[in-house]
Image (tube, helix red, strand yellow):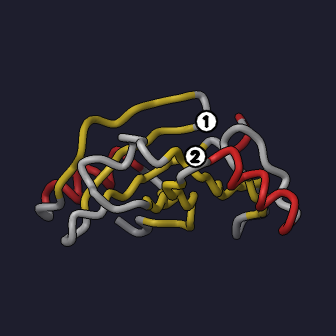
Amino acid sequence: MKKRVTGLGGIFFKTKDSKATKAWYGKHLGLPVDDYGCTFWWKDEEGKKASTQWSPFKEDTTYFEPSKQPFMVNFRVENLNNLITVLRSEGVTIVGDIQTFDYGKFAWILDPEGNKIELWEPIDSAL
């Protein structure tokens, strides 16, 4: 594969009070927060609109499982189906199945220390 990861898709982390955390970042750092956190818009190398998500999650979220870490990184990828095939052949642990939404495809893997990583083939125009 020519490209695997093409950028940072998002940073997700657990908080005791995700609503208060978002409000704090909105007030003190000026982040335009919504129910999901904050979306940062930028342009890729080809000048296409792209985004990166910043999202505080509730402390008791199970979304990061099976990882026990209080964070998860999301990477933007170019061709998720091909990448998962390659990663599987390389012995990388795949968590669950690829899921498809209007705004892109998602898959999850574990790094050597058990940190869950989200892979996202985005459709930024849908956001």
Quadrant of the image occupied by residue 125: top right
Label 2 element class:
strand
Q: Which residue is drawn at 41% across and 43% down?
A: 60
Label 1 element class:
loop
Query: Crowding at label 1, few (<14), some or many (≥20) Cα neighbours within 10 Å?
Result: some
Q: Residue at x 66, y 42 (%)?
A: 36
Q: Is residue 45 above or below residue 93?
A: below
Q: Which amino acid does label 2 sit on?
A: Pro
- Mark 2 vs 1: CB contact within 8 A: yes
Among the two numbered marks 2 and 1 on one chain, the one whose residue lies closer to the N terminus: 1
The percent position of residue 56, horizontal first and vertical second, equals 59, 52
The percent position of residue 105, horizontal first and vertical second, equals 47, 39
Q: Residue at x 46, y 62 (%)?
A: 73
Q: What residue type is labelled 1?
A: Tyr
The percent position of residue 55, horizontal first and vertical second, equals 61, 52
Instruction: Indicate left or right for 124 with 62 as reference.
Output: right
Q: Nearer the viewer, residue 104 or 26?
A: 26
Instruction: Indicate left or right for 46 with 2 as reference.
Output: right
Instruction: Indicate left or right for 24 with 89 as reference.
Output: right
Query: Crowding at label 2, few (<14), some or many (≥20) Cα neighbours within 10 Å?
Result: many
Quadrant of the image occupied by residue 114: bottom left
Which residue is the site of mark 1?
103
Which residue is the site of mark 2?
122
Quarter holding the N terminus is bottom left
Q: Nearer the viewer, residue 53 or 80?
A: 53
